[in-house]
């Protein structure tokens, strides 16, 4: 049993799933924003990192780890809401290129502004659980309490988001506002406010993802760049519209990159993502989990 | 044409520092023009043009290290061809997609190029990159100069003139392309792809062509930059460069020749611009904000331009001219273009 879990392929799959859940989480955020406002949030990773910088630097001032996570998520929430109100709202109804360009600009601003606000934070963020890998019958399994915590936390948050959208009044309104804004407005749903909340939700969750990624290493504004690119690929493979597709795509990309990393080289992991994207788009351009919808003329 | 002649003669009056700045600006202007064509005329967004620049740069450097005595024009054409080929590979799946998919896909490509170059250290020189000889002015050009600094001045000026001429040729082709059958088809695809398809335009072929041309221009610009700087490495062609290209293009004005020129000029003097902002705002250039001011400044500028003046500086100029024209008495008004 032990040798099975420490075999090369199982190691890759476990490692891939561990990074895959974070990718899936970010991909889910992208899908939430895409479905509600039809904007691909290029600053998703950077916005999350901003939240992580606000919260996690408090760790070095003796603040409790869990409190820091909470602060990070609150910072992410606020930044997300502000972004929707200030940057995105003026662009509704404009060509779809405009929000892309604005969010790319915002990505640039955050990545240069963050190191000028918090300077020289090279200390490593502690992890709440041990990073020592489990042993089984003398074999090392690529799974530590911390990795397990990452996976469980990500899955919990995904489950909470699913519950929110499926079973609560708020979730129903958010879905309605995204699907048919005009009708929802007539029925008394405050569409504008819900769109802001959608952005807040996804930016707050993005901050959590950034904290998960950055724990155990030092904070850097570009920590999330690679994750964001993978998350975009995951969301695109899933069809950008489908939350289930995004999560599946995230796990798929995580495992694919893990295999590429182990069997080829670290430098080829990003290429593996591109290959998965190209193949899946050639096979099903509308995404693996979306039904093909004829465009109305 | 006049502009080119003017720019060429201007290089004689400028210092070697300004010449080398202009040379880089001309190379970047080519890339911006390719991006501007893609976004403004075919309505597709690419964040991968820094990746195509890397392809052009590496091809030039690798070729130059194996065949030292190659005419420049040949290296440029080779880099352009390789840029176009890599563009074709990306375009085939990507152009079936719309807007954000394409942008994300090209982003993923530009993200993968750097590590890919590191994977083949024996060919690409690994993280140190490759070096090649600086451009040297030919003898007839050298003879135009005298004095103690003749060699430095002549070389700087030769590179500036060379890249301005290359840029002029690239701009000439693009100007013709704008008004060709392909250019018109492209605009129709951008504005209404269903109507274009009904009119017999092959959507995928047109989009792919736009993408390939843009990639070829990026390859050409990257090759020129490599020749000018005498080196190429994988850190040069980062996500930041793609963002900068987009910023410069939007600042100058999307889809126009003039916009690309403005973008190139802003690139040439971006350091001066940033230090001016430094001086005006009183930010200490050695502080952490000062060190990152360039990124913040251009990012904010990009967002503001997009929100307030989506047509860029070129569009703003046209709007002011239009307003001034309207203030004149009717008999003196110039015919309006809009």
Image (cartoon, coloured by chain):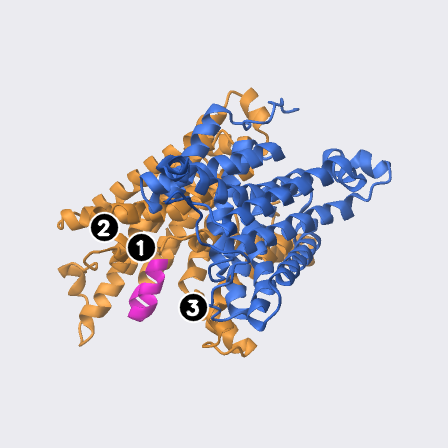
Chain colours: A blue, B orange
In this rendering, would A285 be left or right of B18? right
Is the residue at mark 2 from the same chain as the one at mark 1? yes
Report the disc number at residue B271.
3
Q: Which type of secondary structure does the marked residue at label 2 adopt?
A: helix
- Say whether disc 2 or disc 3 marks the residue closer to the N-terminus: 2
Q: Decide: few, some or many residues near mark 1? Use Cα within 10 Å; few <14, some 14-19, many ≥20.
A: many
B14 part of magenta stretch: yes
What residue range appears in magenta? B11-24
Quick one: A180 or B2, which is closer to the camera?
Answer: A180
Residue at 21 percent of width and 47 percent of height: B123
Q: Marks 2 and 3, Cα distance to the nearest angstrom?
A: 26 Å
Chain under label 1? B
Quick one: B170 or A268, which is closer to the camera?
Answer: A268
In this view, B85 is above or below B116: above
Residue A37 lies, in percent from the top left, at 67, 42
In this rendering, would B121 be left or right of A293? left
The image quadrant that residue A255 belongs to is top left
Q: Marks 2 and 1, Cα distance to the nearest angstrom?
A: 11 Å
Number of residue marks: 3
Residue at 18 percent of width and 69 percent of height: B151
- Say whether disc 2 or disc 1 marks the residue closer to the N-terminus: 2
Q: Are marks 1 and 3 in contact (CB under 8 Å)?
A: no
Residue at 54 percent of width and 48 percent of height: A150
Residue A68 lies, in percent from the top left, at 62, 62
Chain under label 2? B
Which residue in the protein does label 2 denote?
Answer: B61
Q: Decide: few, some or many residues near mark 2? Use Cα within 10 Å; few <14, some 14-19, many ≥20.
A: many
């Amino acid at each position: 049993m032990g040798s099975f879990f420490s075999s090369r392929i199982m190691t890759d799959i476990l490692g891939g799933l561990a990074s895959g859940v974070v990718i899936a989480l970010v991909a889910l955020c992208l899908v939430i924003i895409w479905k509600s406002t039809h904007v691909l949030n290029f600053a998703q990773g950077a916005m999350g990192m901003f939240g992580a910088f606000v919260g996690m630097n408090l760790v070095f001032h003796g603040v409790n780890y869990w409190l820091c996570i909470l602060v990070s998520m609150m910072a992410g929430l606020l930044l997300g809401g502000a972004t929707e109100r200030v940057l995105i709202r003026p662009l509704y109804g404009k060509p779809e290129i405009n929000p892309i360009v604005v969010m790319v600009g915002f990505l640039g601003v955050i990545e240069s502004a963050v190191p000028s606000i918090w300077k020289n934070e090279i200390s490593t963020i502690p992890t709440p659980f041990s990073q020592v890998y489990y042993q089984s019958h003398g074999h090392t399994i690529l799974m530590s309490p911390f990795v397990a915590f990452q996976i469980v936390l990500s899955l919990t948050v995904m489950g909470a988001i699913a519950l929110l959208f499926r079973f609560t009044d708020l979730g129903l309104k958010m879905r309605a506002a995204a699907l048919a804004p005009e009708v929802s407005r007539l029925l008394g749903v405050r569409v504008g406010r819900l769109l802001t909340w959608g952005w807040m939700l996804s930016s707050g969750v993005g901050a959590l993802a950034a904290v998960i990624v950055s724990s155990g290493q030092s904070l850097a504004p570009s920590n999330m760049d690679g994750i964001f690119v993978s998350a975009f690929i995951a969301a695109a493979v899933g069809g950008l519209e489908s939350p289930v597709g995004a999560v599946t795509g995230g796990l798929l990309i995580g495992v694919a990159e893990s295999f590429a990393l182990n069997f080829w080289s670290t430098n080829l992991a990003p290429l593996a993502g591109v290959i998965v994207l190209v193949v899946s788009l050639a096979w099903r351009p509308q995404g693996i989990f979306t039904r093909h919808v004829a465009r109305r003329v | 044409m006049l502009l080119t002649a003017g720019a060429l003669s201007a290089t004689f009056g400028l210092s070697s520092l300004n010449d080398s700045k202009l040379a880089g600006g001309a190379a970047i202007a080519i890339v911006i023009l390719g991006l501007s064509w893609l976004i403004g005329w075919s309505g597709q967004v690419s964040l991968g043009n820094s990746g195509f620049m890397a392809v052009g740069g590496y091809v030039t450097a690798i070729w130059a290290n194996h065949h030292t005595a190659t005419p420049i024009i040949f290296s440029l054409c080779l880099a352009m061809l390789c840029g176009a080929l890599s563009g074709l590979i990306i375009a085939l799946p990507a152009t079936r997609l719309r807007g954000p998919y394409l942008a994300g896909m090209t982003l993923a490509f530009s993200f993968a190029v750097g590590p890919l170059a590191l994977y083949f250290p024996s060919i690409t020189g690994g993280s140190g990159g490759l070096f090649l000889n600086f451009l040297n002015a030919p003898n007839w050009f050298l003879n135009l100069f005298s004095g103690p600094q003749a060699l430095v001045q002549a070389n700087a000026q030769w590179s500036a003139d060379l890249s301005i001429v290359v840029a002029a040729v690239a701009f000439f082709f693009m100007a013709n392309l704008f008004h060709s059958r392909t250019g018109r088809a492209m605009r129709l695809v951008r504005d209404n792809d269903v109507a274009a398809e009904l009119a017999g335009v092959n959507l995928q072929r047109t989009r792919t062509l736009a993408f390939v041309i843009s990639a070829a221009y990026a390859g050409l610009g990257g090759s020129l930059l490599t020749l000018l700087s005498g080196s190429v490495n994988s850190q040069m062609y980062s996500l930041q460069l793609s963002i900068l290209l987009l910023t410069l293009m939007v600042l100058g004005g999307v889809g126009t020749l003039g916009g690309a020129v403005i973008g190139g000029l802003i690139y040439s003097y971006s350091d001066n611009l940033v230090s001016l902002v430094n001086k005006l705002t009183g930010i200490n250039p050695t502080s952490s904000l000062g060190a990152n001011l360039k990124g913040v400044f251009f990012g904010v500028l990009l967002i503001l331009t997009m929100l307030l003046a989506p047509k860029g500086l070129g569009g703003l100029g046209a709007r002011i001219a239009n307003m001034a024209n309207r203030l004149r008495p009717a008999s003196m008004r110039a015919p309006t273009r809009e």
